[in-house]
């Protein structure tokens, strides 16, 4: 195929993916109809935009920020103030466009803070973002008019000023509003990766010195990318504000910044769809697990540490690593290794969950001897027997995984050798 | 007025020395390994909790020795099985690993000891008044903290500058290959340094845990400030950490202790501002509220104008 | 005719250590100028001074008669100077084609645009493809730069150095680590793509130097002890001393 033809078919394929993405979002509420599902999916939309905006920094430009929630939160606060202004009749602006207010706020502060952060790179940059994030969060009780003090700022999204004939009171309507914004924002961020700025951001990430010698001021490239990522974070904040109708100081703070870092990294920083996976997965785990277990943060932390050590490309990285073997028709060779690892992995997870849940029961429960509901069994956290069982299961599982990982590694070596031999390169 | 200044100075110095105990380990680890240990305050918290558990069975003085050693041991395990695998991926990966560790350690503390603050108390042998100033008593334990902090500084300084071990460690930072070629086990040195740094954090926890409160949020409340201190003082500089700790300790204590606002200050020199002008919101803010934000502002400013901090080495 | 590149009285000190101790250098336009010298003489430092990574402690560096000492690297690059590096310096997560396209973005005037789609810029993409042909890398168009062979990476790096239109090119040991056949191929390629450009090249391989260079400067211990045609340098006693030491 000539370059032209293959470019055109690639374009078509991408367009199909985006249409599918929009369709899935449109259809989901008919599959998961409960109001808690709709609320969770709305949240996923918000965090997809937030995580994608974060990856504009980390994945695209190699900038590790510990303070990205500043732009998310300030955008959200600004949006809520705008909504309140409409509530009070002081202003008229359609609700559907309110996220733009958030975006404008995120952009403004992205420019202000970006102009000071992006002069430095690497660890210094990370520290500056940490400082700015802490500074903004702790200044919240100085600027109580803007941040609303302890109780935060709240508003009513049913402003009666809308473009379309919806009130946006019912959560299903909010879901679709968020859904549209998610698709639009994600598409824009995707297109951005294909612009000169997007390419140069990648270049600055890969090799700042070489980027200078193709004529680019790396600081300006980072600054513009930073400001734009603030814009999209602000849009996410606006969507959040519309959905929850309340913003509080922690929304600009370190915990929120840490959360978006976690979900982006777990999803995978190396592929555009990585943060989407991360946002969906982490939101799901948070919503589904936090009702069941005190330890969901611990599970997250362990997953994150595990990935930093063994899978730094995140889930998307793991998926992408299988593209080449799949194209070469060699995936079946990897399966036995994975099959071997599956049972020990499940055992290890079960043992871990057992130990963690029993531990929390002992420390946090009013009466630790009440049995807990674990894997459809009733388990007594105070009995030595339960602990022995859990530890043994964990131990066996871990041992099995270690053994199986050797098989997986050798299978991968085998596949890589075959691919090199046949000249197939990624 | 004089009273409150004197007490602010004393409290500020104390807080500063506590910050220094924490910051010294962090700046050492960075100076020697290039690793910015995000989880440093978590090891501090572990020190406090371990001291609580140990002192419940064996008394404070045993805990004073055993807890930092145990925390250092945990640090060694972390380096050996965690960081060591990640060094090859660069400093960002190391930072991410220690960042993840914060979540893990902080949650493990809740898992083991629960959400409620534990009753880690000052030992009776140190629970008396050292002296009385302006009618307020100065507890002996505070004097003990100051003593330990100063002793720690002296010990680290001597260790690094005057001993052979210290020399090897300092060489291993800038020329790890050469030091390795000379027969020293550089990975083992890194593990030792990390263990030493986290052990220091543990010691700070032992000292502070019964003076303040030992509760699961203590890592999160101390963590960011410690970063401000090391960055402000200069990453890798012990002297800088000391200076920065004292400065920030004093500044924060004064700002929180003073219930004045800028408007009040201006009034004392005869300037009164109208009530409704643009700045009235800002200048009427109680300085105590600004105090919380000040350290971070200082950190951001120094990162802009002098990224190497007060006494750090020049950025390459 | 003014020099393409000139150094006048350039010194560079790091703390108390003097690395470059007074260098005068003149490179005429279109000249192929080689810098040779024993290890530790300061050749890399000299390159870093010219390309803007370091600022001279004393003295001046001029490009086409305009002072560039103290300018930031990207500004120097925009004035027409580019360089390669001792350790191959590419955009390793991009394909060969994308590496070349990135090197053309500024030269083609795209700046920091976030509204153009690079895929649809016909002139840009055609130029990148032309460079692929010239460098002999067309068959490796969509391969990730990190997966190329060493020689191919070197070739690509030289390509990215030149594609942006710089006319004064600094090459830092371009054939380091290559076997004879690769070396000859690389030299031929360099000669072809830098036909009308000014070349300043650091090399250890004397065969390459004497084949390529119009003039040679010998840098020893931070100073240029000789700057002349290859024949003169060959017979220069001071140069022989510097290389062979007291054994001579």
Image (cartoon, rainbow, N blue to C red):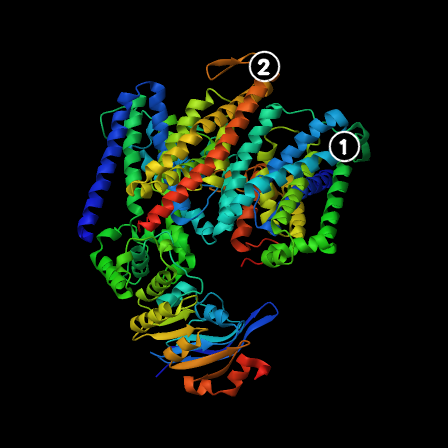
Q: Are marks 1 and 2 on the same chain?
A: no
- Tell me the number on the disc at residue A12: none
Q: Nearer the viewer, mark 1 or mark 2?
A: 1
* In the image, residue A392 above or below residue C34: above
Within 10 angstroms of label 1, few (less than 14), some, or many (20 or more) residues?
few
Image quarter in which the N terminus of chain B is found: top right
Left or right of B121 on screen, residue A328: left
Residue A131 visible to the viewer: no
Q: Nearer the viewer, residue B260 or A76?
A: A76
**Disc 1 on helix, strand or loop?**
helix
Left or right of A338 on screen, residue B59: right
* In the image, residue A412 above or below residue B124: below
Left or right of B122 on screen, residue A79: left
Measured as percent of width and height from the top left, residue C243 is found at 53, 79
Give the residue number, with chain letter if any, for mark 2. A366
Q: Residue at x 19, y 47 (%)?
A: A8
- Tell me the number on the disc at residue B62: 1
What's the CA distance linking mark 1 and mark 2? 32 Å
**Disc 2 on helix, strand or loop?**
loop
Q: Nearer the viewer, residue C64 or C245?
A: C245
Disc 2: host chain = A
**Residue B10 quadrant:** top right
Disc 1: host chain = B
Q: Residue at x 47, y 65 (%)?
A: C53
- Tell me if label 1 and label 2 are in contact, CB under 8 Å: no
Q: Residue at x 74, y 25 (%)?
A: B57
């Amino acid at each position: 195929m000539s370059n032209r033809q293959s470019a055109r078919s690639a374009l078509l394929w991408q367009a199909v993916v985006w249409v599918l993405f929009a369709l899935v979002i449109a259809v989901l509420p008919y599959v998961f109809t409960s109001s808690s599902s709709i609320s969770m999916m709305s949240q996923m939309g918000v965090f997809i935009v937030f995580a994608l905006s974060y990856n504009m920094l980390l994945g695209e430009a190699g900038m590790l920020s510990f303070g990205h929630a500043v732009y998310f939160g300030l955008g959200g606060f600004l949006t809520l103030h705008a909504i309140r202004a409409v509530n009070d009749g002081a202003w008229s602006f359609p609700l559907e466009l309110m996220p733009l207010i958030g975006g404008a706020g995120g952009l403004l502060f992205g420019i202000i803070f970006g102009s000071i952060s992006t002069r430095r790179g690497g660890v210094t940059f990370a520290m500056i973002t940490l400082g700015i994030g802490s500074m903004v969060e702790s200044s919240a009780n100085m600027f109580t008019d803007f941040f609303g003090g302890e109780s935060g700022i709240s508003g009513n999204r049913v402003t009666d000023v809308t473009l379309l004939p919806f009130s946006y009171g019912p959560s299903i309507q909010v879901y679709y509003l968020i859904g549209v914004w998610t698709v639009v924002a994600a598409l824009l961020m995707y297109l951005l990766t294909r612009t000169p700025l997007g390419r140069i951001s990648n270049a600055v990430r890969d090799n700042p010195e070489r980027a200078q010698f193709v004529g680019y001021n790396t600081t300006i490239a980072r600054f513009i990318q930073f400001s734009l990522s603030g814009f999209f974070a602000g849009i996410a904040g606006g969507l959040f504000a519309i959905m929850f109708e309340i913003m509080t100081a922690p929304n600009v703070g370190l915990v929120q910044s840490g959360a978006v870092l976690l979900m982006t990294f777990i999803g995978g920083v190396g592929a555009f769809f990585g943060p989407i996976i991360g946002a969906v997965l982490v939101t799901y785990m948070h919503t589904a697990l936090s009702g069941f277990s005190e330890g969901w943060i611990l599970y997250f932390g362990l997953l994150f540490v595990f990935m930093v050590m063994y899978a730094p490309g995140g889930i998307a990285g793991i998926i992408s690593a299988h593209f080449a073997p799949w194209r070469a028709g060699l995936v079946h060779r990897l399966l036995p290794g994975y099959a071997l690892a599956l049972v020990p992995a499940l055992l290890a997870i079960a043992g871990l969950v057992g130990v963690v849940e029993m531990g929390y029961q002992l420390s946090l429960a009013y009466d630790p001897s009440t049995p807990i509901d674990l894997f459809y069994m009733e388990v007594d956290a105070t009995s030595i027997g339960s602990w022995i069982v859990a530890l043994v299961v964990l131990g066996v599982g871990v041992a099995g995984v270690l053994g199986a990982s050797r098989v997986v590694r050798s299978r991968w070596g085998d596949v890589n050798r075959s691919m090199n031999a046949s000249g197939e390169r990624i | 007025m004089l009273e409150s200044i004197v007490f602010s100075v004393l409290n500020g110095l104390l807080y500063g020395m506590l910050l220094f105990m924490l910051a010294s380990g962090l700046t050492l680890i960075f100076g020697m390994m290039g690793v910015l240990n995000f989880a440093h305050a978590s090891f501090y918290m572990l020190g406090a909790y371990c001291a609580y558990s140990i002192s419940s069975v064996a008394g404070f003085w045993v805990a004073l020795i055993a807890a930092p050693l145990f925390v250092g041991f945990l640090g060694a395990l972390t380096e050996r099985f965690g960081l060591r695998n990640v060094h090859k991926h660069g400093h960002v990966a190391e930072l991410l690993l220690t960042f993840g560790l914060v979540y893990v350690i902080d949650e493990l503390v809740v898992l083991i000891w629960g959400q409620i603050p534990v009753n880690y108390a000052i030992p009776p042998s140190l629970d008396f008044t050292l002296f009385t100033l302006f009618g307020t008593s100065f507890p002996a334990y505070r004097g003990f903290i100051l003593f330990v902090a100063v002793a720690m500084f002296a010990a680290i300084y001597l260790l690094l500058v005057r001993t052979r071990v210290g020399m090897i460690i300092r060489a291993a930072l800038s020329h790890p290959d050469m030091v390795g070629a000379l027969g020293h086990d550089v990975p083992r040195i890194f593990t030792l340094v990390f263990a030493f740094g986290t052990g220091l954090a543990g010691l700070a926890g032992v000292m502070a845990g019964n003076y303040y409160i030992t509760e699961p949020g203590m890592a999160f409340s101390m963590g960011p400030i410690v970063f401000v201190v090391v960055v402000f003082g200069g990453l890798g500089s012990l002297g800088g950490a000391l200076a920065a700790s004292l400065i920030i300790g004093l500044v924060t204590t004064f700002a929180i202790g003073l219930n004045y606002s800028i408007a009040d200050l201006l009034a004392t020199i005869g300037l009164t501002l109208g009530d409704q002008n643009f700045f009235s919101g800002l200048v009427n803010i109680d300085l105590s509220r600004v105090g919380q934000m000040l350290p971070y502002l200082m950190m951001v400013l120094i990162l802009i104008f002098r990224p190497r901090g007060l006494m750090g080495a020049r950025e390459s | 005719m003014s020099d393409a590149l000139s150094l006048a009285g350039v010194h560079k000190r790091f703390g108390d250590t003097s690395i470059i101790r007074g260098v005068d250098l003149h490179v005429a336009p279109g000249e192929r100028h080689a810098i040779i010298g024993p290890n530790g003489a300061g050749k890399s430092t000299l390159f870093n001074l010219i390309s803007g990574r370091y600022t001279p402690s004393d003295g001046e560096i001029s490009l086409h008669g305009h002072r560039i000492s103290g300018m930031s690297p990207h500004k120097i690059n925009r004035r027409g100077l580019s360089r390669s590096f001792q350790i191959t310096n590419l955009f390793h997560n991009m394909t060969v084609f994308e590496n070349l396209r990135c090197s053309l973005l500024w030269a083609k005037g795209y700046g920091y645009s976030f509204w153009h789609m690079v895929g649809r810029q016909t002139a840009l993409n055609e130029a990148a493809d032309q460079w692929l042909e010239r460098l002999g890398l067309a068959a490796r168009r969509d391969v990730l730069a990190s997966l190329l062979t060493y020689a191919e990476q070197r070739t690509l790096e030289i390509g990215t150095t030149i594609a942006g239109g710089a006319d004064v090119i600094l090459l830092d040991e371009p054939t380091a680590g290559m076997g004879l056949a690769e070396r000859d191929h690389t030299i031929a390629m360099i000669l072809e793509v830098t036909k009308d450009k000014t070349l300043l090249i650091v090399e250890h391989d004397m065969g390459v130097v004497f084949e390529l260079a119009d003039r040679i400067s010998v840098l020893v211990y931070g100073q240029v002890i000789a700057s002349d045609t290859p024949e003169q340098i060959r017979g220069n006693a001071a140069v022989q001393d510097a290389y062979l030491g007291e054994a001579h």
